[in-house]
Image (tube, rainbow, N blue to C red):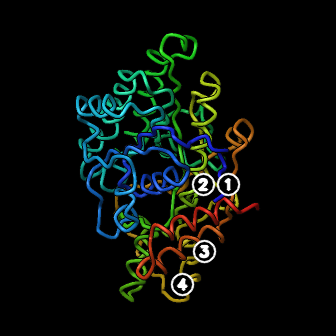
Amino acid sequence: MIDLFNGFYKGKRVLVTGHTGFKGSWLSIWLHELGAEVIGVGLEPYSVKDNFVLSGIGSKIKADIRADIRDLQKMKNIFAEFQPEIVFHLAAQPLVRLSYEKPVETYETNVMGTISILEAIRATESVKVGVMITTDKCYDNKEQLCGYKEDDPFGGYDPYSSSKGACEIAIQSWRRSYFNPDQFEKHGKSIASVRAGNVIGGGDWSLDRIIPDCIRALEANKPIDIRSPKSVRPWEHVLEPLSGYLLLAQKMWNKPTEYCEGWNFGPEAESVSTVWDVATELVKNFGKGELKDSSNPNSVHEAQLLMLDINKAKTRLGWKPRLDMQKCLALVADWYKRYKNEDVYKLCVEEIETFTNDKS
């Protein structure tokens, strides 16, 4: 495997919250392959078919811990025991529609959970870098045609999006109050927040997400119900933002006061597509399947248009997306076509290799 980070992660103690989730499992696999000592902190995985379960990554990493990020003392104890040097905070309640049903839990997990991790970082001298993952939905979305920049206002219509906007405000406050780059010599920590687009990839079985919905229908030989066919999203393979997070953490380690701010990691403009187009491309890769428009004018509000401006990450980090929409969906389909009959850990490593080898 090509190491895009020149051996930086080898031997580093890296704590990942939400490692049992979709993005967290992929990040843990990648870090493990890079030679990091990975400490995973998360809840039980969503299903027995999750990437975390099928890959067996939990048995390969240094520590696989079940804990709730809202439990501040537990977080402090875990940090004290394992003395992480780098923290990637991914744990969250990540679903818009579920946030309408569970608004209090969504806020408790996303806002107070994030504050717990910030406080655990503050209490643990070994931590040098904290990358706090939020979402593109943290912006006050006016459904404008141009992408959101990192300094655009935070907001959110639904409880999920607004909770992530509140997370960003909390991260900003903690950075100013306790991790101010002007006082780096005192605290020795660099804290950034990162916002990704609509992330897709193998091993995601969450409800109300287009790829898992498509795969469930395909495996059951049923038509694929498309809830919001005209919604436009910045789709990207899960490895795209993860490559950005890993690169950013390396830059923060080397120059801690230069990169401790907000960053967008999204696709190029040509990969910003409708839900219908994404499902159509997936069906094409599977060679079977039928789409059905199931839009309901009375359903809960979800944004129709959302895009990110990624120029800052491209110019200042030297990061850029590697896969266009066709390559992205070919890789996504490949995982779901093969997971039942192959070693899923090896399959994930193979996909990371395909991704890192891509020069386009």
In this orientation, which residue lies closer to the viewer: 85 or 122? 85
First in sequence: mark 3 or mark 4? 4
Does residue 255 appear to the left or right of 201 in the view shown? Answer: right
Q: CA distance from mark 2 to mark 4?
A: 22 Å
Ranked by sequence position, the earlier of labels 2 and 3 is 2
Q: Position of residue 3 (x, y in %)?
A: 65, 51
Instruction: Give the number of callouts.
Output: 4
The residue carrying pointer 3 sits among few (fewer than 14), some (14 to 19) or many (20 or more) residues within 10 Å by Cα, namely some
Task: Name the spot of residue 274 as percent of width and height, x first.
Answer: 57, 66
Q: CA separation, marks 1 and 2?
A: 6 Å
Residue 6, numbered label: none
> In terms of secondary structure, where does tag 3 sit?
helix
N-terminal-most mark, 3 or 1: 1
From the image, tell me which residue sits under label 1. Answer: 321
Q: Badge 2 is on which residue?
A: 240
Give the secondary structure at mark 2: helix
Relative image position of residue 73 (x, y in whole percent): 23, 28
Q: CA distance from mark 3 to mark 4?
A: 9 Å
Dot 4: within a 10 Å radius of its alpha carbon, few (fewer than 14), some, or many (20 or more) residues? some
- Where in the figure is residue 349, as x and y percent of width and height? 54, 64
Question: In the figure, 180 relative to 41: above or below?
Answer: above
Residue at 44 percent across and 16 percent down: it is: 178
CA–CA distance between discs 2 and 3? 14 Å
Residue where numbered disc 3 is placed:
330
Q: Are marks 3 and 1 in contact (CB under 8 Å)?
A: no
* Quadrant holding the N terminus: bottom right
Marks 2,3: beta carbons within 8 A:
no
Q: Which residue is mark 4?
A: 286
Q: Give the amino acid at mark 2.
A: Glu
Q: Secondary structure at mark 4?
A: helix
User: Is label 1 in a helix, a strand or a loop?
Assistant: loop
Q: Earlier in the sequence, mark 1 or mark 4?
A: 4
